[in-house]
Image: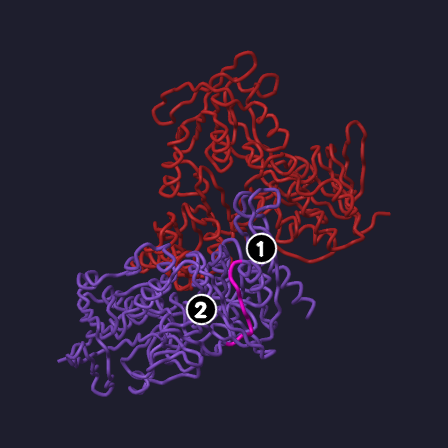
Chain colours: A purple, B red
């Protein structure tokens, strides 16, 4: 007979692996099984660009918890195991490890099937349903290994997509001596993270090091002996076409959630096309949880569902589902902040809160230095903040420059706590000449927003 | 006849100078006069150790707003002008510029008289009411100039007091090649800022570079040809005495507020011996404001009065008094956080909230790295947090290590917003491998505190 603490987890990424750990912490006697279709235990996907660049010197270092770790913690991790069906009625998961069929009952199921790279409609990119040689996405250790073996100094690399991963890869390949071109369909780089005035600071800096075409669609590719040779791109406004010589093409145009198993099992799929979950990470089906990149959850400000695309949220959902599946009680906050950060070409960027287009908000903007003007070595910091016009609450913030991420963490705290701009602008930030000015960019940007807000009232 | 916007400010430090600027911003027609007894316009006192070390290459760079700036903004700054009396009944300030007497009416008076170094009772330290040669405090540009001219490589320097300024000076003098000894009467260094377990991290590092005697009182000095030659110190526990050869002695044992003018004028003096003010920075006397190091205000958690000893609070009070004195309306939050930071010997430290001894609180403690373990270059970060046992609210935090100040700013925001540890531990901090781990020290230290809190309940 199946016990109440027989847990199956599908997927051993950041979400699934973390869920297993916290299920184990919560109940030492839980039976925990993980089905992972890949061949590696839990590793950091976000670290892949740095394993390619050589900053992380062995790609296996990315493995955060080894097979031994899972074994020592009595977690049954089955690698190379594809789940074929979830039978929710009978609480059975049907899988295959190689050719060997597996049927296993669960009392609690945690779905952490993640997401897969989205491939834009570029002509001639596939041959026999496979990407042409030297065209890659970056999602797995195997992807990274293939990319690494295709890198040659002075060769030409093209990256489709100027989001976080696209620019991290542009930096990595540039550091390895490749001639890098970045092609972005949207009008600006980092458009999902920063407003144009903020991303322009980054653009200005990195466009001296790599070629960037914004507002351009990758149209088609040509291959030579089975490897990519040229990419044709088209200006979305003028229709003008250009051909870029390319020895290596990386596609970094976002993700699509892996939801077919969940959909077939009857889990409710939300408006964004991801699995709907609640604060306990439960799906619409009893005893089935879902976490990570295959799920959606509410934005803390707009209360509208947004896709979970961040490792930090995946881990927090993993903690939650793991504890709840093992009989504990834990909830995520009643919305996600989507705090994110990255660094490329020596520039740190960070943001928190939805990039809100149609929300009644006023913004503040500040450019300054990280240190008092009399102290040498101050670095540029630019900040932007958005305030809810009605409530005066801070709803989102962006930063480019010195300690951008930690400055944004303070705003994340303010948003989570529902703090108004009037309170935040009076925050006593830590001051010392070698560390920060008496009035930091964080509070000064709020002064500007507050003044604008008061004028509007 | 005196107009309603005739403002006199006594003192042109960070508090007084800022008040003048914001009074001007609020009302372009205010008549603003500043009486400053020193010979310099507004400069950064906190920057003095770095002007001595040579990090700031000209001491005059510390001047944040020049006499010209005040002139251009139609602020009448009278340097070298000592105020002798405040006649609150007739709203008159009586001062002297050199031998020239000045009597000036005000409609609003802002007292920003600051504080002066406290000299501990060390035998033979004075001769004719003057400190013996090569014995200095550090409060003014002139102090810093005198110290600078007494520094000689390979000479012996002794610093009395291992607080922030004492250790900043120890670092500066050590960098200039002096043999530095630090003498502290309390059991630990940085005792007003960090708990022992946290300050020990600093102690361990810096005691390899300078000699430190904690629990030792400076007992007496000997001079040779009018300059300090030896300092005798005594172990407070054992009574054992030691003589330290000393060519330069710096006293950094705290401040006493300059309140005699205010006291004689009838302003209420609070329990800490500083001027009592409210959220508008008003004293007990109508039309008289007080700001900066001569004042006390409520701690945001305990609601008990604490002395204002931080430039960051002085500036915020200056903004408040300046706006209110000029007819605007502005208030500081209903308590001070006392967020503070410093850096010495390459270690950044920061803290927020009162160092609470008799408060029902539980603490959490975390030592870790600033980056995910797989990413090279992670730096040590140690954090401690205190939680109110009854309300679960975060009440104070301490950090030593990487980006300590910015991490503490996030806690400052949480304390200002009254956030509980249960909410804060779920904060989505910004994650990217080269910048911060998925679960940052900030939230992990709260996990530990939360577990302790729940056990106690």
Does label 1 or label 2 sit earlier along the sequence? 2
Name the residue located 54 percent from the left edge and 32 percent from the top edge: B53
Of tags 1 and 2, which is closer to the observer? 2
Q: Which residue is tagged 1?
A: A441
Mark 1, Cα crowd under 10 Å, few <14 / some 14-19 / many 20+, is: many
The chain holding disc 2 is A
At x 65%, y 53%, the residue is B280
Q: Secondary structure at mark 1?
A: helix
Give the residue at the far left of this rendering: A1
Comparing A15 with B113, the one in front is A15
Residue neighbourhood size for the residue with mark 2, other residues' Cα within 10 Å, grouped as few (<14), some (14–19), many (≥20): many
Q: What's the mark number on residue B128?
A: none
Residue A199 horizontal/vertical position (percent): 56, 64
Residue A246's tag is 2
Task: Please tell me in which quadrant of the rendered image residue B441 appears.
Answer: bottom left
For the view shown, which residue lies furthest in the right direction? B1
Question: Is B332 on the left-hand or right-hand side of A135?
Answer: right
């Amino acid at each position: 007979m199946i016990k109440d603490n027989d847990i199956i987890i599908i997927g051993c990424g950041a979400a699934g692996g973390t869920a297993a750990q916290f299920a184990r912490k919560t109940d030492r006697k839980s039976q925990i099984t993980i089905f992972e279709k890949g061949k590696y235990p839990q590793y950091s996907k976000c670290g892949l660009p740095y394993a390619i660049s050589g900053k992380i010197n062995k790609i296996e270092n990315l493995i955060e918890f080894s097979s031994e770790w899972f074994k020592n913690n009595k977690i049954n991790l089955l690698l190379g195991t594809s789940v074929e069906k979830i039978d929710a009625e009978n609480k059975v998961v049907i899988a295959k490890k190689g050719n060997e069929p597996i049927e296993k009952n669960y009392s609690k199921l945690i779905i952490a099937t993640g997401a897969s790279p989205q491939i834009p409609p570029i002509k001639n990119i596939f041959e026999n349903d496979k990407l042409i040689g030297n065209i890659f996405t970056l999602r797995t250790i195997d992807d990274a290994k293939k990319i690494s073996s295709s890198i040659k100094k002075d060769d030409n690399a093209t990256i489709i997509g100027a989001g976080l991963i696209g620019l991290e890869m542009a930096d990595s390949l540039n550091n390895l001596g490749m001639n890098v071109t970045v092609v972005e369909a949207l009008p600006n780089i980092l458009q999902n993270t920063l407003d144009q005035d903020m991303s322009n600071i980054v653009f200005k800096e990195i466009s001296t090091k790599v070629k960037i075409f914004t507002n351009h669609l990758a149209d088609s590719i040509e291959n030579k002996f089975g490897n990519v040779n040229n990419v044709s791109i088209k200006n979305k406004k003028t229709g003008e076409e250009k051909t870029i010589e390319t020895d290596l093409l990386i596609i970094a145009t976002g993700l699509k959630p892996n939801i077919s198993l969940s959909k077939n099992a009857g889990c409710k799929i939300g408006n964004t096309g991801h699995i709907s979950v609640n604060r306990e990470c439960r799906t619409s089906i009893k005893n089935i949880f879902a976490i990570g990149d295959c799920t959606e959850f509410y934005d803390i400000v707009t209360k509208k569902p947004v896709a979970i695309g961040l490792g930090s949220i995946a881990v927090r959902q993993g903690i939650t589902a793991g504890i709840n599946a093992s009989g504990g009680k834990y909830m995520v906050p009643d919305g996600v902040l989507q705090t994110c950060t990255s660094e490329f070409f020596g520039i740190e960027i960070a943001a928190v809160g939805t990039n809100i287009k149609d929300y009644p908000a006023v913004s503040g903007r500040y450019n300054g230095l990280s240190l008092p003007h009399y102290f040498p070595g101050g670095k540029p910091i630019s900040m932007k903040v958005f305030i809810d016009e009605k409530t005066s609450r801070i709803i989102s913030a962006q930063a480019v420059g010195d300690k951008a991420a930690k400055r944004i963490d303070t705003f994340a705290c303010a948003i989570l706590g529902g703090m108004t701009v009037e309170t935040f602008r009076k925050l006593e930030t830590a001051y010392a000449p070698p560390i920060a000015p008496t009035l930091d960019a964080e509070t000064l940007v709020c002064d500007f927003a507050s003044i604008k807000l008061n004028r509007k009232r």
